[in-house]
Amino acid sequence: MDYWQQQMQAGNQALAAHQPAQAEQCYKQALKDVWPIWFHSCFIECPAELAQEQACLPTFCLAATVRNLAESYARQKRWRRGQRILRQALHWFERGAEQMAAEHPAALAVLTQTAALRQDYQQLKWRQHCSGKPVVWINPEPTALLH
């Protein structure tokens, strides 16, 4: 997970420096690192000796990576790509939630991150809808509020 952490830090720095294309590349590398770990722990085997915090770590790391990658796409106005990566992650998290036994140490983490990814997807759709549109505040007449 050291490589994942390095790539995430580099991506976060690039995003903060208004370089979303560079951040995208870092987040993609981080995704390549964390995806197989998450998949293995979720669908194949989660070692019984892992503490709950350790078992949940891949879930939180994958969710953070997907969120940051979607944000890098959004800042490049690549809305569909951002929505697609969130939908794909949501699909896998939902499958994980369906297949995991309730006593799996990461089951609750997968469920909470599924809900969070669903919300992120909706927010990204809303941001796309609002992008480029002027915000118009309607200030009603004071007398209209009295009737």
Image (tube, rainbow, N blue to C red):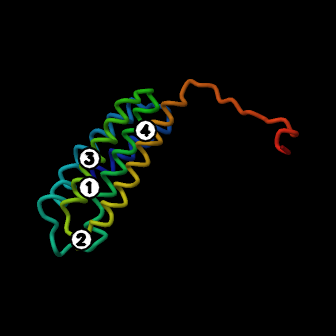
Please rate how many residues cluster around mark 2, counting C-alpha atoms within 10 Å: few if below 14, some from 14 to 19, many from 20: few
Mark positioned earlier in the residue sequence (4 or 1): 1
The dot on residue 1 is 1
Task: Name which of mark 3 and mark 1 comes first in the sequence.
Answer: 1
User: What crowding class fits label 1: few (fewer than 14 Cα within 10 Å), some (14-19), or many (20 or more)?
Assistant: few
Query: Are discs 3 and 1 less than 8 Å apart at CB?
Result: no
Q: Amino acid at mark 2?
A: Ala
The residue type indicated by label 4 comes to Glu
Of the residues tagged 2 and 1, which is closer to the observer? 2
In-front residue for pair 83/17:
83
Quadrant (top left/top right/bottom left/bottom right) for the N terminus? bottom left
Q: Earlier in the sequence, mark 3 or mark 2?
A: 3
In the image, residue 124 lies at what x, y percent?
Answer: 45, 38
Secondary structure state at the residue bearing disc 1? loop
Q: Which quadrant holds the C terminus? A: top right
- Residue at the spot of label 2: 102
- Mark 3 or mark 4: name the one nearer the start of the chain: 4
Residue placed under numbered mark 3 in the picture? 91
Separation of residues labelled 2 and 4 (CA atoms): 31 Å
The label shown at residue 71 is 4
Amino acid on which the number 1 mark rests in the picture: Met
Count of numbered marks: 4
**Mark-to-mark CA distance, 3 and 1:** 23 Å
Q: CA distance from mark 4 to mark 1?
A: 22 Å
Report the mark closest to the observer, 3 or 4: 3
